[in-house]
Image (cartoon, rainbow, N blue to C red):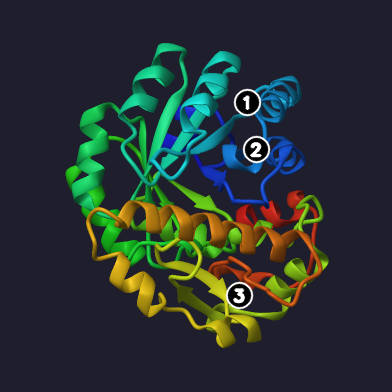
Amino acid sequence: METKLTALLNIQYPIIQAPMFLVSNVAMVKAAMDSGIAGCIPALNYRTLEELRAALIALKEAKPEGGAFGFNLIVNKSNVKYKSQLKVICEEGCDFIITSLGSPEETIRLGHQVGIKVFCDVVDLKFAKKVENLGADAIIAVNNEAGGHRGDRSPKDLIQELKTHCEIPIISAGGVGRKEDVDRMLSFGADGVSVGSPFIASTEAQVTQEYKRACVDYGAKDIVITERISGTPCTVINTPYVQKIGTKQTWLESILNKNKKLKKWVKMIRFAIGMNATKNAATKATYKTVWVAGPSIEHTKNILPTKDIIKRLIER
């Protein structure tokens, strides 16, 4: 399974364990590296810079020969911790950074100064060309089968368009839960895949058993898109609570989002409220179950160690 991604990160299989808010952690990434794939954690999973630094140090110490790990940064104004998180990551070092929801220009410049590769989430060709021109090392092509913040293009259409017009590696994000899905994305021209939702139901994930069981009990048909978490469409499991609160913005949010002066602040407030609701659902016993996941949970039949989930991705 040698591809541009395996060469770029010096890994055995062209798979990145995707960064997932509240779910990804050091234990999961260690298991990923030991199984021949790369792992990534959102910097926002750490409340303090000291905790982030400790995670970087722990992963450097645990990294096997041929292993690779990275961190995800939200690079828009909603993340007030962005610059300080980037500084710590550059000080300690890692193999790659994945940027989301904003311009990666500063991250690419500072990351490259210390030898860190930068991959950028994109949902269309326009932004893909922008990040390529800024010097990104690879593109994370987020399609309409992704969990969390998804795109609106099918995997095949998005991959093939980006491969036609971009020179840097294309990593497909969304719709992968087993080896057949990996092969499908590579057949479209992808150089690798980013896989998240199947790892929610891992023994290493530090979320509630209820969240893990939901990924086992629900399937692709139970995934809906909501605007009630971050203000940006996001995929969640259609629990009774989600059905109760609905998936659209409130009438007040809709009006305020049309006001150019207030739009940024409304989005920041919605982001904070939504992230808090998601955190409580994932880590506490609560009836307010807002569980983020993608349709690839269709192939999740049991709660398993990370290494066994990876076997499903690399073995038939």
Q: Are circles 2 and 3 on residues that touch, CB within 8 Å? A: no
Mark 3 vs mark 1, CA separation in Å: 31 Å
From the viewer's perspective, is residue 86 above or below residue 306?
above
* Residue 298 disc label: 3
* Mark toward the viewer: 3 or 1: 3
| Neighbour tally class for label 3: few under 14, some 14-19, many 20 plus, Cα within 10 Å | many
**Quarter residue 208 falls in:** bottom right
From the viewer's perspective, is residue 219 above or below residue 260?
below
In-front residue for pair 173/134: 134
- Residue 210, given in percent of the width and then of the height, sits at 79, 71
* Residue 66 disc label: 1
The mark nearer the N terminus, 2 or 1, is 2
The mark nearer the N terminus, 2 or 3, is 2
Three-letter amino acid code at disc 2?
A: Gly
Three-letter amino acid code at disc 3?
A: Glu
| Neighbour tally class for label 2: few under 14, some 14-19, many 20 plus, Cα within 10 Å | many
From the viewer's perspective, is residue 178 above or below residue 93?
below
Three-letter amino acid code at disc 1?
A: Gly
- Residue 284, given in percent of the width and then of the height, sits at 79, 63
Q: Are circles 2 and 1 on residues that touch, CB within 8 Å? A: yes
